[in-house]
Amino acid sequence: MRQKIINSILEIDNKRVVVSRPMIGITAMQVCCMKDATDEEILKVCNEENPSGTTNGWSVVVRNGEGGYANPVQCEADKSRLHILIYC
């Protein structure tokens, strides 16, 4: 288990955007990303690594509490990263 956690941390350290929760309900997912990651960069990773199966794919990056969500939130494992919700 410890090695799995270490491998996960190393993977995150090597990528600017990582899919951290591929599915939240039927229309959302979560990424862990560098604070300066752009919406375009985030959506590219989401659509390449975790296709939604919808016509428009993942298309909405929720920032600044949009939609009533406390989003983005600080990553507990790495203070230089954020967890952000994405919608299709």
Image (cartoon, grey):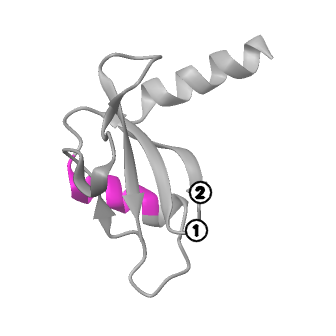
Q: Image point 64% across, 15% down: which residue?
A: 6
Amino acid type, mark 1: Ile
Q: Which image quarter holds the N terminus?
A: top right
Q: Which residue is mark 2?
A: 23
Q: Foreground: 74 or 9?
A: 74
| Horizontal side of residue 66 vs 79, given as left or right | left
| Horizontal side of residue 58 vs 34, given as left or right | right
Q: Quadrant of residue 82?
A: top left
Q: Image point 18% across, 44% down: which residue?
A: 64
Q: Which residues are magenta?
A: 38-46
Q: Are marks 1 and 2 in contact (CB under 8 Å)?
A: yes
Q: Foreground: 53 or 7?
A: 53
Q: Which mark is residue 26?
A: 1
Q: Residue furthest bottom?
A: 55
Q: Foreground: 48 or 72?
A: 72
| Horizontal side of residue 74 vs 2, given as left or right | left
- Where is 58 relative to 11, above or below? below
At numbered mark 2, what does the secondary structure look like: helix, strand or loop? strand
